[in-house]
Image (cartoon, helix red, strand yellow):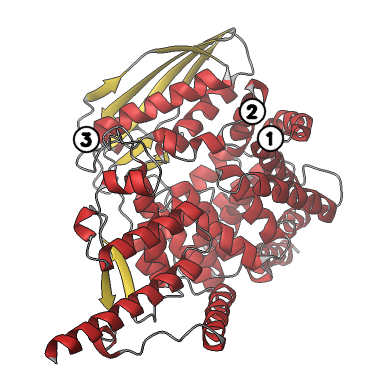
Amino acid sequence: MTGTAATDRDAEARAHILTALERSVAIGLAESSDRQRQLMRFLVTEEIEGRGDRLKAYAIATQVFGRPADFDAQQDAIVRVEVGRLRKSLELYFATSGAADEIRIVIDKGGYRPRFEFHDQSAAGSAPAPAAPGAGSKIRWLALAALAIAAICLGVWGWRQFFSSARSGPRIAVAPFTLSADRDGQGYVGVGLRAEVVSVLSEFEWLTVFPLTRQADLSTLGRKKNAKIDYFLKASVQLAGEALVVTPLLLDAETGVLRWSKRYETSLKASEMLAMERDIAVRVAADVGQPFGVVANIELTRIDADAFNGDEAYRCHLRAIQFWSTYRRDDFAPARQCADRLAAGGDANVQAMRAILLLDAARLDYDARPRAEILTEAATLAGEAYRRSDKAALPRVARYSTALCQGEIEIFKRVGLAAVRDYPNNPATLLDVGAKMALGAGDWQHGVELVARARALSGYSSNWFEFADVVDAIRRNADADVEGLHAAALDSAHPLLLVVDAALQSRLHNEDARRAAMATLAAAGYDGPQAVTALIERQCWTREAKSALAGRLTADAGGRSRAEH
């Protein structure tokens, strides 16, 4: 009798686990690939069938991913990469719409075997069996669909729990690359190359990688107590004709000791530069990666999806990166011209790049057409790029950014969430999605949390181009840690950063600093309160965010006007 009862309890527990499996696949992995869903079902089924001890990299690779019998986990990291992505998806699901589930499926780091946490211990032995197929089954799946829709509509994301589980790993700060060229107008090569190396390095989920600002002093920065930097990566770039020589150096941040260096002689061809970037990333990751495991096979990441079709498209991307590092009108024109010329070719990354540049034109008044017309064109391009390549970085950014500007908040959250899930330790991704979440979607709490995490990952070196936390402090009339913001605003001449700085200095009654910010804005083409107010109105922000800045600047201007009379 006892044996029969135990068997019955085991059968009930198994049935509950299978129900939890299908629920997590249907909702938690709704945006994941078929391969991820297949992997999930395989791991759970093997475990409950008593074969959990066989869940090794070789078995998973050959039975799930179709790898040949000579599969070598040391050379091919597909299992580690895919299980890592699945683990993050499950963590996010059970922190949000699956938070109330009876059974939580967990895959601990360092292994592949799932385990099952029963929130209600009685469910492990006495929960009812799943409903029989038919009307009850249909009702259950309708309920699951309703829960999924409700979770999306309510935006229940559970950021804190998700972030607490992310591993930061070694922190690598990438300094600006120094460029020596035989002709003028080639600065975009060094700027773009650095951004590409940062992007490739960010594919390693156990690394935290971020670019340093121009003001950073490597000789002292690494020794600062709050720097939180383990390594510096810098490089010299020499360009003569089509020949390119790049010499990267990896330095220990605390001691300055050289860890690795290599000389690359290549050309400006996209394929050769991409191969060089990958090799640099693999070398750096191999050097700093222990004890975080074998270096990932970088060919298995999204880098191939992010590649541009052809040398001209790749160079155009470098020009766009140059503009995005300054936001200056002089850098916008060449990037926009080449993007306009190449977008008709059907390259998803070029289409996405052009869509983002159109958004910039609308935001900064770099295009004389009506704002609504520009936004519509950008949204159409972004939608097409995303349909062509929904995993590549630029199409994702273009899709969630244009969705926000069109008022499609749920699409913005869905696509932005996917980017955050895939790059939980990438400060650039966290800053961008967080800023848009707060300023554009009005979700100040979650948006500012994203920005705060990005700043924590970057340590001492803040990227003030994303300033949602500062605007949040201004709107709440609260104090904010803004050391270096004023200098960054004047140095970069970023129009929106200057607006935020002027509003902040006005609130702090720092008249000289406010005047300096307004003067720099005037030099950039936004002369006077009316022009600045118009600039604020062109942003894809909520009314509350716009009023927080415009109200401060307008009130300050009115007070000075009365004082003068």
Q: Depth-wise, is mark 1 or mark 3 nearer the camera?
A: 1
Label tally: 3
In three-dimensional space, the C-alpha distance between marks 1 and 3, rounded to whole angstroms, equals: 43 Å
Residue named by callout 3: 254
Name the residue: 50% across, 82% down. 133
Mark 1 touching mark 2, by CB under 8 A? yes
Above or below, 520 against 27 in this view is: above
Residue kind at label 2, given as amino acid type: Asn
Q: Residues within 10 Å of mark 2 (few under 14, many from 20)?
A: some
Residue named by callout 2: 309
Residue 92: image x %, image y %? 41, 65
**Image quadrant of residue 66?**
top left
Residue named by callout 1: 347
Residue kind at label 1, given as amino acid type: Asp
Residue 451: image x %, image y %? 46, 58
In three-dimensional space, the C-alpha distance between marks 1 and 2, rounded to whole angstroms, equals: 6 Å
**Image quadrant of residue 256?**
top left
Residue 339: image x %, image y %? 73, 33
202 to the left or right of 342: left
Q: Residues within 10 Å of mark 1 (few under 14, many from 20)?
A: some
Above or below, 495 against 318 in this view is: below
Looking at the image, tell me whether mark 1 or mark 3 is earlier in sequence order. Answer: 3
